[in-house]
Every structure is written in C-alpha cells, then in structure tokens.
C-alpha cells in the first residue's frame, strides 16, 4: 500500500498507513483562537447563521491576472448554481473570465487580513434573481 499523507482543516498531518497517527500539529492554540475570532467576526458582520462551512466566497477570475476580487458571499449550494451558469463566464476584450468559489471556512482559515468584498457592478443581478440566490454581503 502506498503511504498517503492527508491534511485536515487544522493542517494536522496524518499518515494513513500508520492508522491515522498524528505526526505533526502545525497550528498552535493561539492561531486557532485567531481563526475562531475571524470566523465569529464575519458571521456577525454578514449575519451568517449556522456553520461557516455552508457559505462560499465567490470571486472573479480571468486568464491574464488569475484570481481576482472576492465579490459575493452566498451559500455553497447557491455558489454551485451561480458558478455553473453559462452567464457567469465569458470573454471580454479577448480575456477569458469566470466566476469561481471557495468555501468561506477555507478562505478565513488561510486569511491574514480582512477580506474586502468588491461589489459586482450589477452585471450579474439578473442571474442572481433568476436563480433565486441570496447574497449576504
């Protein structure tokens, strides 16, 4: 059997071959407290209820510059609907663009500064309305 290394949310490294024995804990309690405080801040700021795992940050990506600004906070299910809609991708002045998402939990876990959501200019409002998507920011 091949030796497989797996990372979980807290970046604990487990060696599956050795029955999941914890090899290393890279996050200190201090850092975990910072993550918890950051999550609490965003839940309060954007009135997010329940588990932060249920929310996504939707961002614009393009061929030339890569990952762009975070634009929307929505549920994971809504993010899947939104990002899979053909109207949320295209070409502008020869540059391919697409909306993508990442879980808000992952983003906040990896975040060292405040996320400033740059609001959409209204270009996606029709898509949001037609797909019945709730925006939290």
Image (cartoon, rainbow, N blue to C red):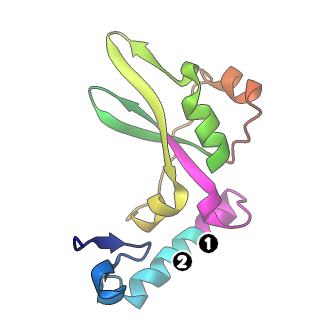
* Pointer 2 residue: 36
Q: Nearer the viewer, residue 7 or 78?
A: 7
* Figure quadrant of residue 122: top right
Point 36% across, 86% down: residue: 19
Q: Work out whether 20 lies above or below 74.
A: below
Between 1 and 112, the one lying in front of the other is 1
- Number of marks in the rendered image: 2
Residue extending furthest top?
Answer: 93
Circle 2 crowding by C-alpha within 10 Å: few under 14, some 14–19, many from 20:
few
Q: Residue at x 60, y 41 (%)?
A: 79
Identify the magenta region: 41-59
What crowding class fits label 1: few (fewer than 14 Cα within 10 Å), some (14-19), or many (20 or more)?
few
Q: Is residue 8 magenta?
A: no
> Is disc 1 placed on a helix, strand or loop?
helix
Residue 27, percent across and down? Answer: 35, 82
Q: Which residue is mark 1?
A: 40
Q: Residue 127: image x %, image y %?
A: 67, 24
């Amino acid at each position: 059997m091949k030796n497989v290394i797996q990372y979980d949310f807290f970046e604990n490294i487990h060696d599956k071959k050795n029955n999941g024995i914890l090899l290393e804990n890279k996050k200190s309690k201090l850092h975990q407290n910072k993550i918890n405080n950051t999550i609490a801040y965003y839940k309060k700021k954007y009135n997010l209820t329940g588990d932060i795992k249920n929310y996504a940050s939707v961002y614009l990506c393009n061929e030339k510059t890569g990952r762009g600004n975070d634009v929307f906070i929505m549920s994971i299910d809504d993010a899947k609907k939104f990002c899979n809609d053909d109207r949320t991708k295209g070409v502008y002045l020869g540059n391919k663009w697409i909306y993508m998402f990442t879980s808000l939990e992952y983003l906040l876990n990896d975040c060292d500064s405040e996320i400033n959501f740059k609001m959409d200019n209204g270009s996606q409002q029709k898509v949001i309305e037609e797909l019945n998507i709730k925006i939290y920011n």
